Structure formats: structure tokens, C-alpha cells
Image (tube, coloured by chain):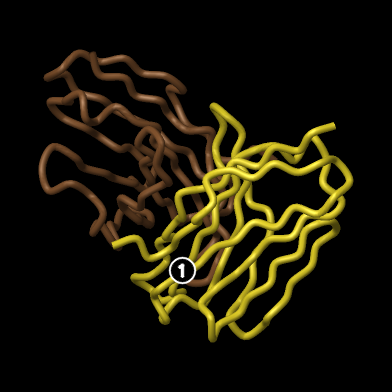
Chain colours: A brown, B yellow
Amino acid sequence: NAGVMQNPRHLVRRRGQEARLRCSPMKGHSHVYWYRQLPEEGLKFMVYLQKENIIDESGMPKERFSAEFPKEGPSILRIQQVVRGDSAAYFCASSRSWGAETQYFGPGTRLLVL
Amino acid sequence: DQQVKQNSPSLSVQEGRISILNCDYTNSMFDYFLWYKKYPAEGPTFLISISSIKDKNEDGRFTVFLNKSAKHLSLHIVPSQPGDSAVYFCAASTGETSGSRLTFGEGTQLTVNP
């Protein structure tokens, strides 16, 4: 029973490039959440998606960041024109339903912007 | 506005003794609370949760206590083991449709000494 999968585990980009982070939820889970952890800080909510729908993107920066969860395939967090401040660990979590439901986390993608 | 706070960045205890990790929150709408454990370079691992209708939940060596009037919860680990050494995050949710997002504290680094 595979857990939440994220790839790549590590990603190095130069300023101005694009970063694509992928997340495959646990089997049977149709709700996906993305969180970001900056160095020395806790995890901060970014976006909550269900299949083909963005439910809550109130934690997403207004520019350069986007997320999708297509009908088929993994959820994608896309960061355009990366800057050094985007360097962080990005974690994906999934749950079976919304509400007071335990979220299970993937191992994270560590993004380093040079 | 830090709605969930873990005021102790670190805690050191002796193997076999009790570890008590504390968490305070300010948002009275939170009604579901979780504790996660995190090792370096890994994603958070779910430990235990509690609904606001309860004041205690126990699972093996882990017990979570909730004091709603004080907006305070704590995680007790007894007996503590060296393998428990990790960063512990407290998280909270409103449990509503748009509130499935988890709000995390900053984390407490627990070190259990042999």
C-alpha cells in the first residue's frame, strides 16, 4: 500500500527557470494539499485540490505559482520564473475526504534556486 | 498572525522518562487537532489526533490532551525512547469545507538521550 509519492525529491533550478513538482496521492485518496516549509519555519498551507478542481488556493502566492490535479495523473505544483526565495521544501498531502480528516504526507521535494 | 504556536523550540529528556510537548492556539474555530513527527529529509508522519468534543485521546505510548478553555493541547510520550528524537509539529483544522487546510506550529525538536 504505497503512501503519497512525490518527485523529484530534489530539484535545482537557476533563477528565472520553471520548477514542476509532482504528487501522487495515496490509493483511494482524491484530495490533495500542498504545503511549503521555508528554512527554520513550520509548514504553511498553499493550496487544496480535488480532481480537476481547486478548492482553496488562499495560501498560494498571487504570481508565478499554479497547481492542478487532472482527472488522470499526478497533481502538479508549478513555479514559473523561480527566485531564490522559492527555495524550500514542498510537501504534498492527501486525504480520503475533506473536513476533519487526517492528511498523510509525502517525503517532500526540496527545491534549491541558485 | 501565528494561530498555532509551539513556544519551545527544543526539549531534551532521558530515555524512559515522560516527554511533554505543548501547543497553544488562538483561533476558537479550530475543532480538530493533530500531532505529526518529522525526521530530517522526510515528510511529516501522522501520530495522533483529537476532536474538540474530546479532552483526551490515547494511542500506545502517545496521549494527547486538549484544554479548550485554555486553547492548549499537549502531547505526552511515555516512556520516551531514543527513536522518538525528531521534530514534532502540532496542527489544527476547522474541519469545514474550506477549512481542510492544516495550520501548523513551528515545531519542537525532541531529543531523547539514552
Across and down, in percent, residue A45 comes to 35, 52
Can you tell which quarter of the image residue B44 is in?
A: top right
Q: Is residue B106 left or right of residue B18?
A: left
Across and down, in percent, residue A26 comes to 57, 45
Residue under the point 46% across and 55% down = B105
Callout 1: chain: B
Residue under the point 53% across and 71% down = A100
Disc 1, SS = strand
Across and down, in percent, residue A113 comes to 25, 19
**10 Å neighbourhood of mark 1: few (<14), some, or many (≥20)?**
many
Of B83 and B94, nearer the camera is B83
Q: Amino acid at mark 1?
A: Ser
**Dividing the image into 4 quarters, which one contains the N terminus of chain B?**
bottom left
Residue under the point 89% across and 46% down = B16
Tell me how many marks there are: 1
Residue under the point 29% across and 27% down = A87
Can you tell which quarter of the image residue A36 is in?
A: top left
Across and down, in percent, residue A79 comes to 21, 32
Q: Is residue A70 left or right of residue A94?
A: left
In the picture of the structure, the residue carrying the numbered disc 1 is B93
Q: Is residue B10 left or right of residue A79?
A: right
Q: On screen, B1 above or below A108? A: below
**Dividing the image into 4 quarters, which one contains the C terminus of chain B?**
top right
Of B59 and B99, nearer the camera is B59
Q: On screen, A66 above or below B96? A: above
